[in-house]
Image: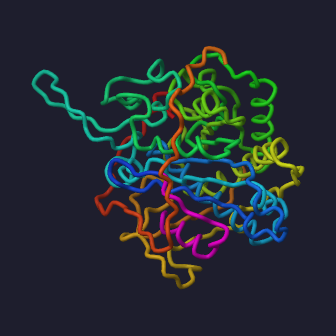
Amino acid sequence: MEEHLFRLREMNPRLISLYEIGRTHENRSIVTAKISARQIMPDESWRPFRGPAIWIDAGVHAREWIAPATAMILIAALVNGYNSEDVGVRHLVEHVDWYITPVLNPDGYEYSHTKNRMWRKNRRPAFCKQQYFNRICCSGVDLNRNFDWFWSITGSSADPCHETYHGPSAFSEPEKSVRDFLQVHPVKAFISLHSYSQLWLLPYGHKKRNYPEDFHTVQRPLALRAVKALERLYGTEYQVGSGADLLYEASGSSHDYAKGVLNIPFSFLVELRPQNTLHSTGFLLPEAEIMDTADETWEAIKIVADKMLERYAPLPPIETSRGKNLMGITSSTEIEGNEHCSTSTITPPPTTPTSIKTSSNTSTSKTTIKTTRRKNNKNSPSKPTKKPTTPTTTELPTNQTLMVNTTTETTTTTTLMTAKQEYV
């Protein structure tokens, strides 16, 4: 996956920048791609303009493979749309800074490919405890229970062995670098991609029927427009509401923190395909549905970006293109690791990248995406008193090598639980 990002930057060096916003417990880079065209706009008067930014992250929960795949395709959609002179996409790339982090939890993501397909948390070093005559050691923190928004109050566990372990304290994990990044960038829209259940979730999730002041006037109407655009493409239906109302009460989530503490106007958590039904494939979404999922998600995100520009940019939004395959493809396609690459001095990662796939098979030596087209504040916590510090964000030079795990063990087969039993 990192290698594919390097290739995209190599071919579009003035359009894409890659930043290491932090490092994980296992010393992997957390890489954020910035897509922006203001530095190459023909109208020089626009070049110094610092437009509103949109943040998209994925891979917070390791087993939700469709989320990183969708994020990677969104990056390609922005780049390909701009290069193909799609008027709507060019407008969005020229007037919005797009910050996309495909895998916020690279340690857990790698572990879900090599050890345990159903792993959810990050890979915080193990905490060991004595239980009768057994010594039990458990690793990891649920990153979406670790944000400082009513942290540890509800919907999480103090037990390190539990899937929703909230950590020893709020922001105890190195992935908190997302908070540091958001504090110093003009982000006006925050979207966190997860799976599954086909839900467009709004703040707040820590308590039922507890909403921001603009929930009924801004947040919900915008979300309804977004899911309507999504549905028009392939007929996929999403529900809209807070996580507490539609799923369960859970505090410490990122989109609640973004809205409640950082005051980011448009803040959403999106649970992608499939639906949460008794016979659902759950986290094991068929590979054939990857592109459809990304296509329809892009339609919804464009609605959010247009609304953001309507409020924060001096130019009115331009109608974006609808109904196109994001990669410019109308039938089955395969993106191989060595295709369409020009010669470069970029040093690739030392091992082959993990496949972008959502099946239960083991990872392969190439990044492959195959597709077959189918139809188908009240009570808010106190604000941080500590003055935000500038995060140690580092732009990756063209010869930067990202660390990846060289483990080649096969994935442990895990029986999929009934949909109603799973945390999403």
The reply to whether residue 412 is in sight is no
Q: Residue at x 81, y 38 (%)?
A: 225
> In x, y percent, where is residue 308?
78, 43
Residue 4 painted magenta: yes
For residue 176, above or below residue 13: above
Point out the residue furthest to the front here: 387
Q: Residue at x 26, y 35 (%)?
A: 138
Horizontally, residue 352 falls left or right of residue 71, namely left
Q: Residue at x 42, y 50 (%)?
A: 109
For residue 278, above or below residue 83: above
Q: Which residues are magenta?
A: 1-21
Point out the residue furthest to the bottom here: 343
For residue 356, above or below residue 413: below
- Quarter of the image where one finds residue 187: top right
Horizontally, residue 305 falls left or right of residue 107, namely right
**Which of these two is toward me, 286 or 50?**
50
Horizontally, residue 228 falls left or right of residue 255, namely right
For residue 115, above or below residue 218: below
**Which of these two is toward me, 318 or 392?**
392
> In x, y percent, where is residue 371?
61, 62
Residue 408 painted magenta: no
> In x, y percent, where is residue 232?
80, 46
The reply to whether residue 192 is in sight is yes
